[in-house]
Amino acid sequence: MENKTNSRGLGFLGVLTLIFITLKLIGYIDWSWWWVLSPLLIPLIIGILILAPLLIYLRKKIK
């Protein structure tokens, strides 16, 4: 019997965000915090832009 475990870790965007935060905190980059956190925020915004019209459509269809 095989023992399979799923371990995903941080992923590319998580590591990139940690690098940006570290560079910001040590003063190497002088970016806005919006840009530093953008690897996390951009996929979230894209997801909202995709899901919002879908949810609106489904809500209108149910009524």
Image (spheres, rainbow, N blue to C red):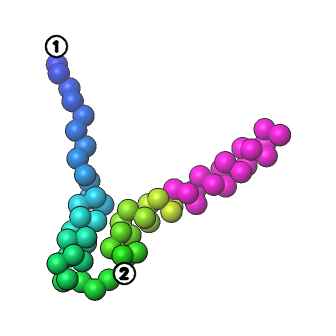
Q: Quadrant of the N terminus?
A: top left
The nearer-to-camera label among 1 and 2 is 2
Q: Residue at x 25, y 72 (%)?
A: 20
- Identify which residue, 24 or 49, lies in the foreground: 24
* Disc 1: which residue: 1
- Identify which residue, 29 or 1, lies in the foreground: 29
Residue 21: x and y in percent read 25, 70
- Identify which residue, 23 or 62, lies in the foreground: 23
Secondary structure under badge 1?
loop
Secondary structure under badge 2?
loop
**Residue 28 quadrant:** bottom left
Q: Residue furthest top?
A: 1
Measure how far apart labels 1 and 2 are at the Cα level.
Answer: 51 Å
In the rendered view, tell whether residue 29 sits above or below residue 59.
below
Residue 50: x and y in percent read 58, 56
Q: Residue at x 65, y 50 (%)?
A: 54
The span picked out in magenta is 47-63
* Disc 2: which residue: 32
Q: Quadrant of the C terminus?
A: top right
**Residue 22 quadrant:** bottom left
Q: Is 22 left or right of 45, judged from the image as shown?
A: left
- Binning the other alpha carbons within 10 Å of mark 1 as few (below 14), some (14 to 19) or many (20 upward) gives few
Q: Residue at x 44, y 60 (%)?
A: 43
Three-letter code, disc 1: Met
**Magenta span has 33?**
no
Q: Residue at x 33, y 73 (%)?
A: 36
Three-letter code, disc 2: Ser
